[in-house]
Amino acid sequence: MSEHKMTSTRVAELLGVTASSVKRWADEGLLVCERTAGGHRRFLASEVARFRENGLSHTEQDALTPTELNMLHKGVIGLDDTGVVTSYNERESQFSGLDPADAVGMNFFTEIAPCCNNSLIYGAFRAGVATGEMNVRIEYTFTYRVAPTNVILHLTRDQASGKNWLVVEHL
């Protein structure tokens, strides 16, 4: 029995993005699809589930425009090597109450979320910056700016660009 296949429009509805974003991601190899005889994209349900569960890799995040970052269902924060915010998507803004324009230029660990200025999170960030390799998932509870909020933090670093990312999945 073959697996269920979905159109770009249906995938866009499920991911909460535009169909043009889904098509672009497919064309760039970020989201796997098959082509029909007529050239239409069809996406396997398992691939869409994997993409939705895992989100974007750090390389894929680098390829997104600020508008596309804002369409993601998880908080996405770009950080320079000192922890200063370089990008802050709308989803994270909704959770934190902090306007993205205000967040950019602030130090995440000392000004935005000092509850993360500890050996577990900031220590993992510093170690990743020092080695040039970072791919750490941490279950955590935010306690600053908001009522205690359970999250999964995913710290990554793209070696090619030197960009650091913090993806926040609110549970």
Image (cartoon, helix red, strand yellow):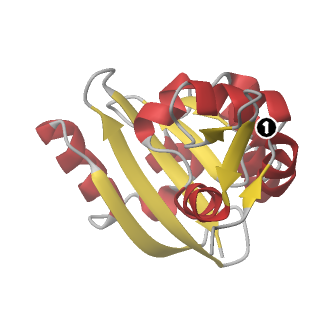
| Residue 143 appears anywhere in the view | yes
Task: Name the amino acid, label 1.
Answer: Asp
Q: Secondary structure at mark 1?
A: loop
Q: Residue drawn at (87%, 51%), measured in percent from left and top?
A: 13
Where residue 129 appears, x then y in whole percent?
23, 38
Picture layout, residue 161 above or below residue 144: above
Report crowding for label 1: few under 14, some 14 to 19, many 20 or more residues within 10 A (C-alpha): some
Q: Residue drawn at (20%, 42%), measured in percent from left and top?
A: 133
| Residue 100 appears anywhere in the view | no
The N terminus: image quadrant: bottom right
Counting labels gives 1
Left or right of 96, for residue 77: left
Left or right of 138, for residue 44: right
Where residue 15 appears, x then y in whole percent?
76, 52
Quarter holding residue 77? top right
Where residue 3 appears, x then y in whole percent?
64, 67
User: Residue 42 or 89: which is nearer the viewer?
Assistant: 42
Residue at image mark 1: 99
Q: Residue drawn at (55%, 61%), measured in percent from left and top?
A: 50
User: Residue 125 or 158: which is nearer the viewer?
Assistant: 158
User: Residue 14 or 84: which is nearer the viewer?
Assistant: 14
Q: Residue drawn at (42%, 32%), measured in percent from left and top?
A: 59
Picture layout, residue 28 above or below residue 45: above
Where residue 85 appears, x then y in whole percent?
53, 32
User: Residue 6 or 99: which is nearer the viewer?
Assistant: 6
The C terminus: image quadrant: bottom right
Quarter holding residue 147? bottom right
- Can you name the residue that lies furthest to the left here? 131
Picture layout, residue 78 above or below residue 74: above
